[in-house]
Image (tube, rainbow, N blue to C red):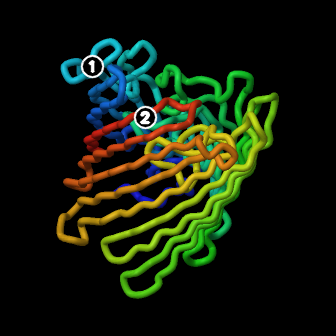
C-alpha cells in the first residue's frame, strides 16, 4: 500500500527476471508478456470558479520481452490511454491529466529496448523505465514516465550496484506538454549523464550516491541513507537522511542545495512518520525534482519543494495496515504537508492527502486518493482539490 515515508526507489533499471533460450526461435517463443489494465477516474475542483474538470480513461501497458539468447534480449511495450466519453467532461470540463495535447486519447511505444548481459554487466539501450533519484517512472496517473537512454549496471561487488548511462529524451505525465511524445530533457540540452552507486552491505542500512550532468540545466549531486532497525517485538523504526546540490548551467534557474530528514515508527498495524526538507538557494533560482516525482522526503501527492525559492517542507503522516486488523488487503494513509518560504513567510501552501488501497487479489488492486491544496504562493495555481480513483489489474 501507499507508504507514508517516501524515498526514491534504490534501483537503476526496472527489469524482469531473465529466461534463457537455446536458439533464436526459442528466444521469441519462450518470451513473456506482461503489463497492466488500468481504469482511471479523476476530478479536480477549483473553488471560486466554474473550471471544475473530470475525466475517465481505460488503458495501461502491454509488453513483450524475449528470453535471453547468448545474453541478448529485446523488449517492447505499448502505452495506451483512451477516454471514456460518457464519463468525462467536454471541452473545458475535460480534465487533461490522462490525455495528450488537444485532450486526445493516445497510444504510443513507451518501451522498445535491446538488452545485453555478460557476467555481472548489463547494458540496455532504447526506450525503457528507469528509477533513480532525479529520473524516475513516477506512475501517478495512467502510465509511468519512460526514457530514451543507454544504461549500464554492474553487480559484481557483493551488496553493491554501480550504474552509468546517458538519458536523452522522456515521455509521460511529468514530461508536460504532449505526454505521449518523447521530448528532450531540456530545450537547450542534448541529455544527461547519470552515474550512481548503491550499497546495502551493512544490515539495515541502504546507501546511495548519484551524479547527474544535465546539459543546459545543471550539474547535480544527490545522496541519501536509510537505516531500519527493530526497537522491540512488533516495533520498528526507519530513518532517512538526504542531501543534494544543483550547480546552474546556462542561466537555467536551477541552483541551490537541499537537505532532508525523516523518520517512521511502525507499531503493529500503525505507522506514524514525520519529514523535513530545506532548500537553500539564491534569489531567482530553485531546486527541482529532476525528471519525475523527485527524491524528497516531504513530497506529497501533489506538492513538493520543486521550483519553490528558499523553501521549507514539513510532513506529518499516519498509515494503518488494515490487513493486520482483519480486513485483508486493505490500508489507509493520511498526511499533512506544509511548504513555505523562510524568507517570505506569507508564501505558503498546505496539502492534506487521504489514500486508501485495497488488494482484492495479488493482481487486482484499487486505489483512491484525495488531495486538497490551500495555496498562498502567488506563483502557484491557487486552491484546488483532486480526487483520483484507479483500478489496476497486473498480468
Residue at mark 1: 89
Quadrant (top left/top right/bottom left/bottom right) for the N terminus: bottom left
Mark 2 neighbour density, 10 Å: few (under 14) some (14–19) many (20 or more): some
Disc 2, SS: loop
- Relative to 165, does residue 191 appear above or below in the rendering? above
Alpha carbon separation for disc pair 1 and 2: 21 Å
Which numbered marker is on residue 149? none
- Relative to 258, does residue 78 appear above or below in the rendering? above
The total number of labels drawn is: 2
The residue at the point 40 percent across, 73 percent down is 266
Q: Are marks 1 and 2 in contact (CB under 8 Å)?
A: no
- Residue 357 appears left or right of 317: left
Residue at the extreme bottom of the image, as rendered: 232
Residue at the extreme front of the image, as rendered: 346
The residue at the point 44 percent across, 78 percent down is 236
Mark 2 or mark 1, which is nearer the start of the sequence?
1
Camera-nearest residue between 282 and 109: 282
* Quarter of the figure with residue 277: bottom right
Residue at mark 2: 383
Q: Residue 345: image x %, image y %?
A: 62, 46
Camera-nearest residue between 217 and 381: 381
Q: Residue 23: image x %, image y %?
A: 47, 42
Q: Residue 252: image x %, image y %?
A: 75, 30
Disc 1, SS: loop
Q: Residue 87: image x %, image y %?
A: 21, 24
- Relative to 26, does residue 381 appear above or below in the rendering? above
Mark 1 neighbour density, 10 Å: few (under 14) some (14–19) many (20 or more): some
Mark 1 vs mark 2, foreground winner is: 2
* Quarter of the figure with residue 155: bottom right
The residue at the point 47 percent across, 30 percent down is 110
Quadrant (top left/top right/bottom left/bottom right) for the C terminus: top left
The residue at the point 69 percent across, 39 percent down is 286
Amino acid at each position: 500500500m501507499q507508504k507514508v515515508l517516501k524515498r526514491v526507489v534504490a534501483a537503476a533499471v526496472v527489469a524482469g527476471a531473465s529466461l534463457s533460450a537455446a536458439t533464436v526461435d526459442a528466444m521469441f517463443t519462450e518470451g513473456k508478456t506482461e503489463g497492466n489494465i488500468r481504469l482511471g477516474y479523476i476530478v479536480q475542483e477549483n473553488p471560486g470558479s466554474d473550471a471544475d474538470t473530470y475525466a475517465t480513461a481505460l488503458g495501461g501497458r502491454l509488453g513483450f520481452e524475449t528470453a535471453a539468447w547468448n545474453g541478448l534480449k529485446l523488449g517492447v511495450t505499448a502505452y495506451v490511454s483512451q477516454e471514456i466519453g460518457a464519463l468525462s467532461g467536454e471541452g473545458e470540463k475535460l480534465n487533461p491529466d490522462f490525455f495528450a495535447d488537444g485532450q486526445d486519447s493516445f497510444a504510443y511505444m513507451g518501451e522498445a529496448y535491446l538488452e545485453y548481459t555478460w557476467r555481472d554487466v548489463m547494458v540496455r539501450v532504447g526506450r525503457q523505465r528507469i528509477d533513480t533519484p532525479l529520473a524516475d517512472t513516477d506512475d501517478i496517473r495512467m502510465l509511468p514516465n519512460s526514457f530514451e537512454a543507454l544504461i549500464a549496471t554492474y553487480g559484481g561487488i557483493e551488496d553493491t550496484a554501480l550504474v552509468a548511462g546517458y538519458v536523452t529524451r522522456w515521455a509521460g505525465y511529468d514530461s508536460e506538454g504532449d505526454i505521449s511524445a518523447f521530448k528532450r530533457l531540456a530545450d537547450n540540452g542534448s541529455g544527461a549523464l547519470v552515474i550512481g552507486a548503491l550499497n546495502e552491505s551493512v544490515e539495515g542500512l541502504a546507501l546511495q550516491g548519484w551524479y547527474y550532468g544535465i546539459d543546459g540545466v545543471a550539474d547535480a549531486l544527490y545522496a541519501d541513507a536509510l537505516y531500519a532497525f527493530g526497537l522491540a517485538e512488533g516495533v520498528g523504526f526507519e530513518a532517512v537522511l538526504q542531501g543534494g546540490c544543483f550547480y546552474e548551467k546556462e542561466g537555467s534557474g536551477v541552483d541551490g542545495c537541499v537537505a532532508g530528514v525523516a523518520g517512521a515508527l511502525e507499531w503493529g498495524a500503525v505507522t506514524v512518520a514525520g519529514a523535513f526538507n530545506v532548500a537553500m538557494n539564491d534569489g531567482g533560482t530553485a531546486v527541482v525534482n529532476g525528471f519525475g516525482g523527485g527524491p524528497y522526503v516531504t513530497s506529497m501527492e501533489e506538492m513538493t519543494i520543486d521550483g519553490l525559492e528558499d523553501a521549507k517542507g514539513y510532513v506529518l503522516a499516519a498509515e494503518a495496515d488494515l490487513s493486520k486488523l482483519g480486513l485483508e488487503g486493505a490500508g489507509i494513509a493520511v498526511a499533512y504537508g506544509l511548504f513555505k518560504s523562510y524568507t517570505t513567510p506569507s508564501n505558503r501552501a498546505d496539502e492534506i492527502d487521504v489514500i486508501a488501497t485495497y488488494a482484492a487479489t495479488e493482481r487486482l488492486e484499487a486505489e483512491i486518493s484525495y488531495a486538497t491544496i490551500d495555496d498562498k504562493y502567488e506563483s502557484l495555481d491557487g486552491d484546488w482539490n483532486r480526487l483520483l480513483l484507479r483500478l489496476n489489474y497486473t498480468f
